[in-house]
Structure formats: C-alpha cells, structure tokens
Image (cartoon, helix red, strand yellow):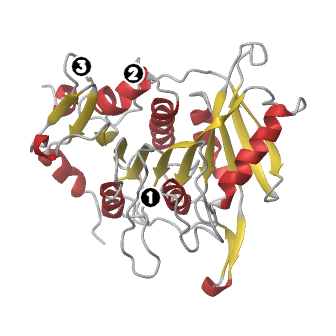
Amino acid sequence: MMTLKALSVAAGTALIVCGIGKTVAAASITDTPLFENVSSYSTTISASDDLADIYYPNPSNLKTGNYSFPIALLLQGANVDKSNYTNFASTVARYGFVVVVPNHPKSLPEFNFTGLLPETSEIDAVLTQLVAENSNPASPVAGVVNTEKLGLLGHSQGSAVGLSAIANLCVPILCEGSFNRPNELLAGAFFGANLRNFETQQYIPINNSGIPIALLQGTIDNVALPQRAKATYDNIQTPPKAFISIIGANHFGITNTNNPAGALPDTNTPTIPQDVAVETVARWSGLFLRASILNDQNAFDYVYSTGDALDPNVSVISQAKPVPEASYTLGLVVLSVGGAILRVKKHKQEVQVNRNRKVA
C-alpha cells in the first residue's frame, strides 16, 4: 500500500517510495552532492583572532575548472567546539560551498559564562577573511571563492544569531554594539532554532526582506523545543521559507556524536542513527542554500516539491512565494502560483509528529 508521502507530489510529477515503515538513509536521483572530494584546512580569522576550519570541494581540476563557490558560515552552538561539525560541514561543502566553521570564545560575566558562543560580528569578520583567502596565492581556496554570495548555517545559539542577522537586528547577547546586514547575505539554514527576547521570552518578528530561511528541527529535541521552532517559522515575515522536521532527531542531530562534551545535553535519546541525522540535515541545508543562492532549479524542486515524499526521515512545510490567504485550504494542498509551490502538510500527519514532541 502506498503512503501519503508517496502521494505527496507536485503536479505532473510521479513518485514511488519503497521500504514503507522503515527509517533509512534518504537518497534519490535529485539530491546527490555535486562533488565527491572535499578537503579542509585550519586558519585564524584575522579580524576576530578566532580559530576556524574551512571545508571546500576539491575536484581534480579545482584550479583550472573556473569554479566559484559561495561562502557558507556555520555559527556554532553554545560551547560546541568546531571539531563536532566535521561531518556536517564536509557534506555541505560537497554541494558546492566553502564552509567556514569558527570557534568564537566569549565571556558573559552577568550569566557566569565563559566559553564558545557565536555572535553577529563573525559574519563581517569571515567575509573579510575569505576575500583575503581568495586573493592569496598560498591559500588552498585562492581564486575559487565567490565572495559576493554568503549563506548562513547555524546550530542552536548560532541559529538564533543567524536569524537575528537576517532580520538585521542587534539582539543582546547575540550581538554587541551594532550590526548591519551585509549585501552578500542571501540565505540561511538553521538547526535547532528559535528567536525570542531573552527578557520577555516573546518571539521576535523576523523581517527577512525576502531572504530565504529554512528551519531544520529534530522532532524530539528537548533543548530547543519543536513548538518554539514552529512559532519562529510562523514569525518569518516573507517567503521563501521552509520548516523541515527531522524525524527522531534530538538537539544534536547536526553534530558528529550525540551530546558532545561541553554542551548542554539533550535528555532525549535520538531514534534516528546519528550519521543518518547529520547527512539528512546537511543535505537539506546544502540543497536549500543552492536553491536560494544559486537559483539551482533541481535543488529548488527537491526542497519545495519532491524531497518530502522521497525522504522518509523528514516532514516538510514550505512556502516558495507569497500566495493570497484565501487560497489556503485544509488537508494536503499543493498550489502552483506562477511557478511558486506552497506545501501544507495534512493535519493527520502533523498530529502524528506532535505526538513525538515533548510539550514545554
């Protein structure tokens, strides 16, 4: 018997999903990374003195193939060392990005905190650094970085930083002094994210000026609760946007191992294998950035149309462009408006996912 996910397709597309009832590593002909080989090196971000790891596609013709890879800056979770993101960063790089993963030390005496904590200042610092790397003949990425295109990735606290940056806000703790969103910032994909006022706990409207945002969320995350991520998604003012639930993942579905040392642990044990969770988060993040930054039609179709049905490990709500409010309906709806696709998940499916969530 074919399930709802196998029937959930865009108009004119036929899909068959096998292995019903199993949780398996997702794969399809449309989601394969563009590059097989990835290399990395470590450097120091001059403007901040932060240590950083840089991952980049490394085909055999890297220096002769006329490549121009956008930058993807990964903003870490609180006290999560950059070494915990090697698998995620490597996978995103395979989709054609130079992925920068800094360690940003910070002290907050008022909260008795000293450790790794991301903030908005990293964005300009990394952009400046990659301009220098791109023009330095001794750099492994010399001449292959598109320094005019930047996507943000984030985990937990880093996701809040990324969301505030896209909203062009300087939020206390996430930002010091002032912040102006750079023109190079074109999209963001964030795992374990919500954006709230630290004092009032009210959700902050995200006036994203049409900059595409994807929120990726573990369904059993007990640190950044799923309902808070959904409330944040609803506060993203303009599409394109996507809410991608990773079924069975907790707060650390993006890191090499569950509950890495130093981080606030998640008391929920993931039911999806760690490597499958990381690959899933990285694949959807990489394809979302390709669709948003590079106008990759294949990636766009996967994110907004076919990927949800093909991938048994996710449940997706997405909106590519604004549509009239009157066109929303209950049930499973796929609307085409000038090529824009709005996917609204069936209520029955949402209830099933909600049963897995712990209510705050």
Residues marked 1 and 2 touching at CB (< 8 Å): no
SS category of the residue bearing label 1: loop
In the rendered structure, the answer to whether residue 222 lies left or right of residue 354 reads right
Mark identifier at residue 28: 2
Total numbered labels: 3
In the image, is residue 45 above or below residue 176?
above
- Please identify the quadrant where the C terminus is shown: bottom left
Residues marked 2 and 3 touching at CB (< 8 Å): no
Using a 10 Å C-alpha cutoff, classify the residue at mark 2 as few (fewer than 14 neighbours), some (14 to 19) or many (20 or more): few
Q: What residue type is labelled 3?
A: Ile
Q: Residue at x 74, y 14 (%)?
A: 60
Residue 30 on image: x %, y %: 41, 20
Q: Which residue is drawn at 22% across and 24% down?
A: 10
| Earlier residue among tags 1 and 2 | 2
Q: Which residue is drawn at 26% across and 23% down?
A: 17
In the rendered structure, the answer to whether residue 8 lies left or right of residue 177 reads left
Residue 78 on image: x %, y %: 59, 65
Tell which of 27 and 137 is nearer to you.
137
| Earlier residue among tags 3 and 1 | 3
Q: Residue furthest right?
A: 138
Residue 309 in view in this figure: no
- Please identify the quadrant where the N terminus is shown: top left
User: Which residue lies under the disc numbered 3?
Assistant: 16
| Earlier residue among tags 2 and 3 | 3
User: Which residue lies under the disc numbered 1?
Assistant: 193
Residue 250 on image: x %, y %: 42, 56
In the rendered structure, the answer to whether residue 284 lies left or right of residue 256 reads left
Tell which of 221 and 42 is nearer to you.
42
Labels 3, 1: front one: 1
Q: What is the distance, in whole Å, between disc 3 and disc 1 at their CAs?
A: 32 Å
